[in-house]
Amino acid sequence: MKQRGHRRQWWAGAACGALILSAAGCSSSQMGKIAEQIGATAQGVITAGTAPDATGQGELGFVMASRLWGRGLFPEAARLVLDFAFRVVKVHRIEARSAVDNARGNAALQKLGASREGRLRAAFLRDDHYVDQYLWSILDTDWWADNAQQSDR
């Protein structure tokens, strides 16, 4: 029950423009456009969406204002979105991508329990040039195992 109240706090924060969380699903480009449109009113966007082909796969996307980095907001918010995706939507696999040179983003994904699966060459257009990205994944079985270990502590 405590978890449910905590989830409501994040959604209330979203209504106040503190952070926008979405489990409805936005593509990476849609998420960027949302962040652009809301500009100064939002501090970040975290989204998890599922593939339209019902394969049980989803994608995690995130962007957060740099002044909020290092405060522990991303892991807390991302865990809520991921927990929703695995528990409610019943996603089997969540993928995320992060630019190879994004040390903070890659570290954050690793702390969430994601496994780095490979390097996608020239996979993302940034500032008129393509950059490589790492492909990360979290499986439902990994999620349940990691969360069981944390609740045992």
Image: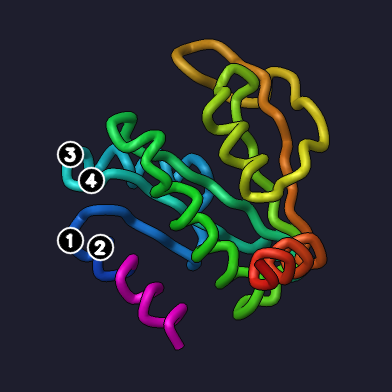
The residue depicted at 73 percent of the width and 61 percent of the height is 146
Locate residue 40: give its quadrant.
top left
- Rendered location of residue 102, percent (x, y): 55, 23
Would you place residue 60 above or below residue 65 in this image? below
Q: Is residue 10 left or right of residue 117?
A: left
Q: CA distance from mark 3 to mark 4?
A: 6 Å
Residue 13 is marked as 2
Q: CA distance from mark 3 to mark 2?
A: 15 Å
Q: Earlier in the sequence, mark 3 or mark 2?
A: 2
Q: Which residue type carries mark 1? A: Cys
The answer to whether mark 1 and mark 4 are in CB contact below 8 A is no
Q: CA distance from mark 2 to mark 4?
A: 15 Å
Image quadrant where one finds the C terminus:
bottom right
Instruction: Give the extent of the magenta segment.
Output: 1-10
Q: Secondary structure at mark 1?
A: loop
Residue 16 is marked as 1
Locate residue 138: give its quadrant.
bottom right
